[in-house]
Image: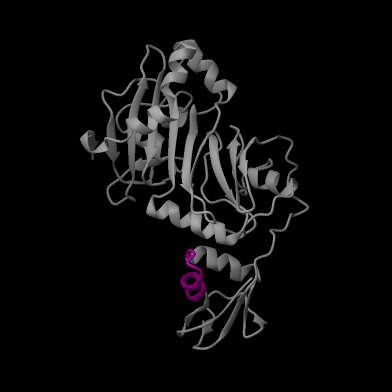
Amino acid sequence: MVEFITKNEQRLDVCISNELQISRNQALNLIKDGLVKVNTKQTTKPSFKVYIDDNILVEFAKPKIKEDKFQADFDVPIIYEDDDLLVINKPPHIAVHGASSLKEASLVEWLNQNNFMLSNLNGDIRAGIVHRLDKGTSGALVVAKNNTAHTILSNQLLDKSMGRIYLALSDFALKENCIIQRPIGRNNKNRLKKAIIQGGRDAKTAFLNLIPSKNANLIAAKLFTGRTHQIRVHLESINRHILGDDLYGFKSEKDKISRVMLHAYMLYFIHPTTKQRMEFKAPFYDDFKQIAFKNFSKELFYEKTETNFINDSFCDLDSWMCIK
């Protein structure tokens, strides 16, 4: 619970966003969920006008579990957990949160059904979710247990003190290590896809060659922004494709690959309470390893995926070619 006195005349959602240092959308969710009172009276109208010296009370309730949600019949490995957050290794084929088109349980439903306390800044459907992964993508994901942690972690996404490094198996090796900085927006021809478009949102990714081979290549990608399908779109723009990514141009007559071979391998951030830097590595799932070990020796694979090696390799980005 947070209580404060207003200092300006403004909309309620703007007031809460500024006071709690959260996004306008997160403030809107708190108001619509009935968790805000103005001078002891509940209001669910984001545009409600507040005046100087009004008393604002924001209550943070545990997200509700709706009876009509799907039962989560899967398990999710937990890499780390404390009172503020947990880091999980999301399995492939599981959506992070629900949607009207989703007819199966999501990660949020699994978290609820296993009685994890979650933040509700993003509403019940996206409870605890600080950042997301595509359904087919596996790997490290941080989940906030309370709104203070959620706010601090969200801000780290914005100021880049939270970092994410992905590993992918691609059809062609990169010609050289490179940084791609090309804007991403809606694909006008296919609503499921994103595209490089003039006037789109700025997007920047660094790509590192790890292991080249004839049929599959191991590459690493470091995100500087977090656009939907960013890694996949940037690779397509240089005629490279992740194995299994039929949406963005991967073609194979022989292989039947059930998902995009993209894994969120490394995640680092500053802990919201202790202020210590934390770094996590998500173990690979069997489908990823199966393809990798067909094309590379295990010794070489584990040598090139050692975290210190990857971190050191990304240190000298100023010398890399930038593609715009």
Q: How many marks?
A: 0
Is any part of residue 160 visible from this angle?
yes
Nearest the viewer among 101 and 88 is 88
Q: Position of residue 170 (x, y in %)?
A: 40, 23
Front residue of 253/266: it is: 266
Query: In the image shown, does 223 or 195 lie closer to the viewer?
Result: 223
Does residue 292 belong to the magenta stretch? no
Where is residue 33 drawn, in percent x and y?
64, 67
Residue 193 location in percent, x, y?
Answer: 43, 40
The N terminus lies in quadrant: bottom right
Left/right placement of residue 273 relative to residue 170 reads right
Q: Position of residue 121 (x, y in %)?
A: 58, 61
Residue at (52, 41) in percent of width and height: 133
Q: Residue furthest right?
A: 67
Above-or-below relation of 310 to 2: above
76 relative to 171 in the view: left or right: right
**Image point 47% across, 43% down: which residue?**
268
Q: Quadrant of the C terminus?
A: top left
Which residue is depicted at the point 55% across and 45% down?
Answer: 142
The residue nearer to you, when weighing 253 against 38, is 38
| Residue range (magenta) | 13-23
The rendered magenta stretch, by its main secondary structure, is classed as helix
Colour setup of the view: one colour
Vertical position of residue 236 compared to residue 24: above or below = above
Can residue 236 be seen in the rendering of this structure? no
The residue positioned 54% from the left and 56% from the top of the image is: 273
Q: Quadrant of residue 119?
A: bottom right
Quarter of the image where one finds residue 295: top left
